[in-house]
Image (cartoon, helix red, strand yellow):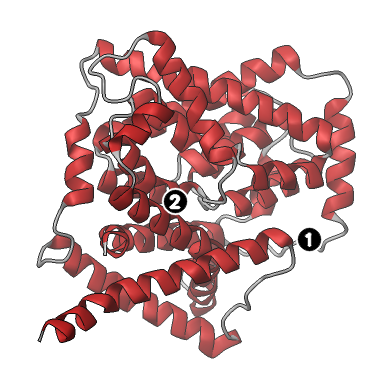
């Protein structure tokens, strides 16, 4: 019931965010983005950040788009800027963070996303091995293969046309298709941890958690534990947020939570995909760069917020997890509205071209599907159990 309640809280935020993302992806094409990105200059990095901001928050979709941009000639720094922005600066992620963690984390997410990009630019400029970028681009072009140039209609005409909104419906369905397994697993894990895992476990795992002012080395360790914990999960950025709220409610410092949220690009499935796209040398280089900049960014955010006396209160996260989820409030009406919108968009997609088939082409897909299936059974049984308990009592 905690899992279902957490998802109920976030449902309208997911739907609103994916609707905005779908509209942007239809009206702003990859070809337009490619033509704007070249060498690693301020203009290219700025545009890559903007394009990432208005794109999808799905890590795996962002990886594919980044590969396409890089293979077609975009420099490494703008490509990575797009990747970081599309997983840390997107609208839907900010909305979900606001629901679960509060405005300080939203500010931290967006300010931190910009810091990540600037630090990545600096680190790559200082450390990129000679010829590694050209080798990786060759590998990416082989992985990309030959594709047809996409048609680029005028966005003003497209936004006024039935065809444009049909594409939005199709894109909206695909957004949910890409993330439903991650979301199902992520929210189930968050609900299980919130219910069964004692506070002492978090105090052992995240050294210094629960203290009012952990020492610098304790914050640093928490910033390192966050990515390590995330590395072995299959949960994407959107599925991580309720778990981040659970961790914060159990006393993990602001720096540790931000490091955990920023870690969606250093998980093992992402590393494996990066290796397929660019080769292992570039994949490990990107992993090392991302680990370094997310730890530094998380610490800078923590001490910056502390200096301004803006660090959030962990009690706010406890209230989120322990609240009465199902009641008549703004969440109910927003969810009903977006359930209706979602139903219309799904029906439109189904009537035009059917719903997308489940993708189980790789071991990762099979594992995710199995875990999501187990989670769904767990949720159904848990939701029905009170009914049978009431019958037994009677």
Q: Are marks 2 and 1 in contact (CB under 8 Å)?
A: no
Q: Position of residue 145 (x, y in %)?
A: 87, 56
* Residue lying furthest front: 393
Q: Which residue is mark 1?
A: 149
Kindly identify the residue that appears in the image at 54 percent across and 53 percent down: 58
Q: Does residue 269 appear left or right of residue 23 in this picture?
A: right
* In the image, residue 117 above or below residue 273: above
Location of the C terminus (image quadrant): bottom left
Q: Residues within 10 Å of mark 2 (few under 14, many from 20)?
A: many
Location of the N terminus (image quadrant): bottom left
Q: Position of residue 323 (x, y in %)?
A: 15, 53
Residue 25, visible in the rendered structure: yes
Kindly identify the residue that appears in the image at 22 percent across and 32 percent down: 314
Residue 393 sits in quarter = bottom left
In the picture, the disc for residue 335 is: none
Task: Mark 2 vs mark 1: give the one in front.
Answer: 2
Viewer-nearest residue: 120 or 152: 120
Q: Position of residue 210 (x, y in %)?
A: 26, 25
* In the image, residue 179 above or below residue 44: below
Q: Which residue is mark 2?
A: 238
Q: Does residue 333 appear left or right of residue 381 in this picture?
A: left
Indicate the secondary structure of the residue bearing disc 2.
helix
Residue 217 sits in quarter = top left
Viewer-nearest residue: 266 or 167: 266
Q: Position of residue 212 (x, y in %)?
A: 22, 18
State the CA–CA distance, disc 2 to disc 1: 31 Å
Residue 155, visible in the rendered structure: no
Q: Residues within 10 Å of mark 1 (few under 14, many from 20)?
A: few
* Mark sitting earlier along the chain (2/1): 1
Indicate the secondary structure of the residue bearing disc 1.
loop
Q: Does residue 133 appear left or right of residue 394 in this picture?
A: right
């Amino acid at each position: 019931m905690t899992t279902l309640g957490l998802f109920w809280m976030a449902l309208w935020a997911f739907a609103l965010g994916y609707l905005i993302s779908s509209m942007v992806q239809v009206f702003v094409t990859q070809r337009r983005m490619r033509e704007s990105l070249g060498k690693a200059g301020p203009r290219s990095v700025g545009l890559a950040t903007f394009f990432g901001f208005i794109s999808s928050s799905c890590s795996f979709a962002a990886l594919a788009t980044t590969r396409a941009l890089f293979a077609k000639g975009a420099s490494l720094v703008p490509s990575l800027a797009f990747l970081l922005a599309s997983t840390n600066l997107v609208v839907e992620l900010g909305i979900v963070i606001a629901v679960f963690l509060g405005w300080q984390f939203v500010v931290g997410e967006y300010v931190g996303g910009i810091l990540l990009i600037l630090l990545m630019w600096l680190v790559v400029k200082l450390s990129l091995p000679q010829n590694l970028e050209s080798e990786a681009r060759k590998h990416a072009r082989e992985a990309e293969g030959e594709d047809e140039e996409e048609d680029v209609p005028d966005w003003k005409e497209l936004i006024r046309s039935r065809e444009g909104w049909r594409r939005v419906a199709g894109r909206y369905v695909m957004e949910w298709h890409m993330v439903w397994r991650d979301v199902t697993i992520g929210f189930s894990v968050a609900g299980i941890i919130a219910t069964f895992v004692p506070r002492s476990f978090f105090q052992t795992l995240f050294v210094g958690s629960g203290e009012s002012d952990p020492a610098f080395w304790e914050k640093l360790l928490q910033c390192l534990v966050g990515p390590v914990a995330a590395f072995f999960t299959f949960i994407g950025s959107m599925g991580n947020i309720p778990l981040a709220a659970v961790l914060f409610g159990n006393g993990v410092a602001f720096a540790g939570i931000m490091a955990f949220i920023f870690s969606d690009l250093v998980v093992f499935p992402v590393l494996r995909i990066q290796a397929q796209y660019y080769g292992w040398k570039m994949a490990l280089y990107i992993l090392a760069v991302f680990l370094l900049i997310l730890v530094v960014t998380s610490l800078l955010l923590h001490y910056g917020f502390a200096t301004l006396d803006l660090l959030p209160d962990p009690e706010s996260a406890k209230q989120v997890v322990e609240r009465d989820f199902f009641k008549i409030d703004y969440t109910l009406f927003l969810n009903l509205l977006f359930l209706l919108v979602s139903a219309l968009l799904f029906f439109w997609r189904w009537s035009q071209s059917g719903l997308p088939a489940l993708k189980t082409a790789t071991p990762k897909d099979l594992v995710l599907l199995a875990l999501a299936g187990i989670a769904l059974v767990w949720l159904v049984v848990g939701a029905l159990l009170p009914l049978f308990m009431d019958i037994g009592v009677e």
